[in-house]
Amino acid sequence: MTTQSEATNHKTISKDMRIGLFIPCYIDMMFPEVGIATLQLLERLGLNVSYPLNQTCCGQPMSNSGDEVNSAPAEHLFVENFKEYDFIIGPAGSCVKQVRCHFDTIDQTDEVKHIRQHTYELVEFLHDILQVDSFPWAEFQHSVAIHNSCSSIRGLGIAKPSEIMGVPFDKTANLLSKVKGLVLVPVDRPDDCCGFGGTFCVTDEAVSARMGLEKAHDHLRHGAEYVVSPDMSCLMHQQGIARRVGLNLKYIHVAQVLNDGPF
Amino acid sequence: MDNANQVDPAKSAELFILHDQVHEPMHDRFLWATMQRRDAEAAAIPEWEELREIASKIKEHTLTHLDHYLEAFEANATKRGAHVHWALDAAEHNEIVFSILKDHGVEEMIKSKSMLQEECQMTPFLQSRGIKVIESDLGERIQQLDGQPPSHIVFPAIHKTRKDVAELFARSVGTDPNNDDPHFLTEVMRNNARPRFLAAGAGMTGGNFAVAETGTFMVCTNEGNADIGASVPPLHIASIGIEKLVPRVEDLGVFLRLLSRSAEGTPLTQYSSHFTGPRKGGELHIVLVDNGRSRRLGMPDFWHSLKCIRCGACMNTCPVYRRSGGLAYGATYSGPIGVILDPTFDEFKYSELPFHSTLCGSCTDVCPVKIDISDQIFKWRRVMAKKGYLPLAKRLSFAVSGHVLGHPEEYHAMEKVAEPAIDYAPHFLLYNRSLNPWGRDRELPQIVKQTFREWYLANRS
């Protein structure tokens, strides 16, 4: 498996490099504002970004269910769409993990290898590659609980998992702490899975819903107004649960905060 | 496809959650608190991550030289006066144990906790042959009295409340059903067990570690029940899986530091007993059991699961296990370690287990011997998909969406035709529109007027 250390975090970037914008299917259809925020943010940072129009899905729902035969067409298409780009940036930890770690059953051509090594989740790209140290345009006068997804934490290394001993770090928190007015609130179980899990949320509905409900109560108990995540798919699930039971929590993507909208 | 023998963990977990408002939250809270203690204990050891690495290396080394260490163990244990037996599978293990008991005229036997004996279904086998078998571990005894298997490999009755136990003891021992004081209940069972230790013609234990260089094996407990069982009756039989080998006594210094911290968040088990040969006047039999282990050793993707020291940390940390209860897995081993072990015994029966996981990866990170549990769960899904064991709804929709997602013209045509977006989005994002389980506990995402792609076409090109 390719890990975050192999997709080296020591790459350098110049303004003329071509950045491919990877907008996962559910963001395209249900959360277009997250795609817009990501694009505008990367443009603000002076990058040459374009969005390949033939995108569909990275193949994750099939791949995560072990169905490599039916995930292969989506994976091949992804490679075709993005092979010309120097970096591929997606605002979705689990989809980036799919590309980096699980594009391993298709032929490992040079193009596939290039794509697996150069596809980044937005937060790690801003934090490790661009090393952005301020977001002067951003202001967010709210209390925020961070939800780093499991794929982002344990698949991409965006924060230290609580089970591993060592010095704590959280790249999402680092970026958000540079936003004027924003107050981060600690929670009891920061990296306990929220229960989305892709198709798990419907195949294991009862367990999934229970996990999501406890996550929402954890956020609410600590006074969060907003839950902010690099993974909108977890938030889609958490938001659905909070709305059903009438909990007053708002869910937005980290790109929307760092770009100051659209909300 | 015949589903008669296939376990359905999602359905069983749902029953556990819906049963009442008490059991599942208690189960989750207790195991979470155990994890908090584990984190604190691990954090107090600066070289924790190094210890995990060393433990993993020792196990990998031993497993890749297993023939050598097994023979050394047998020779050294025999030299110390133990009788060593080899069992190819569960049936052979049970026959060996039965014949030893029969040779000694044993009619009643007391045993401590052993997952291997559970795996071999030894107790029902012996009881069907007229031998009375009593569990001496409190949690196991509770489960035995209730006619249930253990739901957790370290805390067998963790899914039960104090009230459940009080009612069970009232039924089976005759105590006051309203007295659920833990001290009272423990004392009841202590007094109940004492005469059984004296009546038993044999004591059985498992073994946490078997040391090749000395022929010693270790049994780690908190109740001391294994020590009484091994010390009072004249005959001691220990069942040990062949993967329990470690080369040297000094290796125990690594594993004992990891075991109880990972299992319960305590520095050490109350009793960490070494058995080297029989005690004076006693007789010691060791049954070394394969039961599919050497086959697993030959599986490139799954042999690392043999490193397991049965601490249960992966179960305590697993958010799915905490909400499901161990009985939902319908197998000897539950939780993440069960998900990767059980299919090696029966792929079809346990084909749903790898899907009873969010693949969050916490199990891999907590494992004291660094088993790549989460990756193995993912790989088991691939095995199940190849064998055609994916649920039918998933198989059909994946075949359709697999094609559409590889063909952008069809995908975008579909996007245009279907209005509003929400009508088709759940269909291929969630794969089960007919049942629509998404909506049972959740609102659907709000409908958008314009997709990102449409916005991009209007604003950037």
Image (spheres, coloured by chain):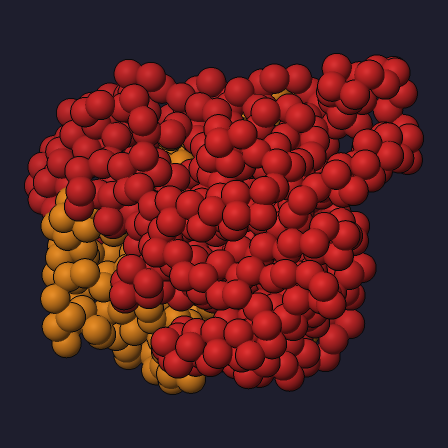
Locate residue B416, reporting x and y percent. Answer: 17, 29
The reply to whether residue B346 is visible in this rendering is: yes
* Quadrant of residue B234 within the rendered picture: bottom right
Please, is residue B117 above or below residue A20 in the view?
above
Locate residue A41, reporting x and y percent. Answer: 44, 60
Instruction: Please tell me the colour of chain B.
Output: red
Figure quadrant of the N terminus of chain B: top left
Labels in figure, total: 0
Locate residue B431, reporting x and y percent. Answer: 28, 29
Left or right relative to B458: residue B184: right
Please, is residue A96 above or below residue B162 in the view?
below
Picture residue at 75% right of the left edge, 15% below the top: B171
Left or right relative to B130: residue B386: left
The reply to whether residue B266 is visible in this rendering is: no
Picture residue at 78% right of the left edge, 42% below the top: B198
Picture residue at 65% right of the left edge, 54% below the top: B235
Locate residue A173, reporting x and y percent. Answer: 63, 62
Picture residue at 59% right of the left edge, 25% below the top: B147
Tell which of A55 and A261 is nearer to you: A55
Tell which of B347 and B236 is nearer to you: B236
Left or right relative to B232: residue B176: right
**Colour orange belongs to chain:** A
